[in-house]
Amino acid sequence: MRRVARIAGLLLGALLLVAAWPAWQLWGEIRKAASEDPRVWEEDIAALEATTATRASGSGTVFVGSSSIRLWSTLERDMQPLSVIQHGFGGAKLADLEFYAERLVNAYQPRAVVVFAGTNDIHPGNTKPPSTLLATYQRFVERLRADLPNTPIYYIGITPSPMRWEVWTIARETNRLIREFCATRSALHFIDTGPALLGGNGEPDRDYYVFDGLHLSEAGYAVWTEIIRGRLLADLGT
């Protein structure tokens, strides 16, 4: 009987440890996301480089950005027949992407680049002005263009999430500025998935988001897949 209780105790401890690990990891990302120093992500960037170091130069489309890219567990399957390199990390901001542009994008000489970032720069109580985010994205593009002068770059517009709905007007203005910037440059594109994520009441459809009201659900990623894959295949072919 004691042996059974001991085994049950060990199993319970193991389950608690497994449950605690994601929470600890999430707390680490929240802490780093609150920082304005891109160097806090060094370990995450090094881990991504280690994972994708063997990818042949020019062999795929780099998807770079925040946790919505990192958590896209079916990205490789969803983008078939396109080859992809998945470089999403934590609560990345646009300035973080700018800082690591050469390591996460340029070094891979990709066929195309897909970017999703900016949502972590716009949230209640701590929001950067749209003009600042535009300037940051422009610097990011400049760093890519130093090595990739003609590579298509696709910016996925900031999404209208339930968690950050109260600052949607700021996000929408940021999208407008980046969309207009893309329209003035060759091989720069803007992909707007926002309207497809709204419900009939004009607000974010919660079915497209997980419990936190911020990250996409399986249904939300299905919307992204249809729009983004369709656009890439239309522009790039197979």
Image (tube, rainbow, N blue to C red):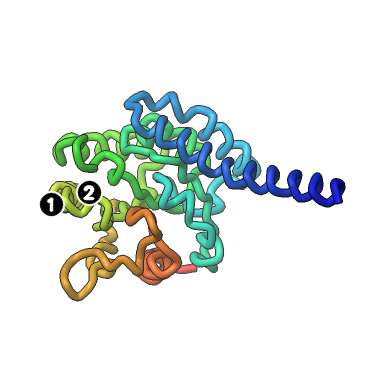
User: Is 176 above or below relative to 209?
Assistant: above
Quickly name the residue at label 2.
185
**Percent position of residue 217, x then y:** 42, 63
Specify the amino acid type for callout 2. Answer: Arg
Q: Which residue is mark 1?
A: 169
Q: In the depicted view, which residue is nearer to us: 216 or 192?
A: 216
Identify which residue is drawn at 40% across, 45% down.
66
Residue 136 location (% of width, % of height): 25, 35
In this view of the protein, which residue sits in the foreground, 208 or 212?
Answer: 212
Q: From the viewer's perspective, is residue 93 above or below residue 205?
A: above
Q: Earlier in the sequence, mark 2 or mark 1?
A: 1
Q: Secondary structure at mark 1?
A: helix
Q: Position of residue 172 (x, y in %)?
A: 16, 53
- The outermost residue toward the bottom is 200
Query: Dot 1, crowdedness within 10 Å: few (<14), some or many (≥20)?
Result: few
Q: Secondary structure at mark 2?
A: loop
Q: Nearer the viewer, residue 177 or 126?
A: 126
Residue 180 in view: no
Tag 1: amino acid: Thr
Q: Specify few, some or many for label 2: CA neighbours under 10 Å numbering under 14, 14-19, or 20 or more.
A: few
**In the image, residue 222 above or below residue 154:** below
Seen from the viewer's position, the closer of residues 153 and 94 is 94
Residue 13: quadrant of the picture: top right
Marks 2 and 1, how far apart in space? 25 Å
**Residue depicted at 34% across the width and 53% down the height:** 214
What percent of the width, then of the height, locates residue 160? 24, 57
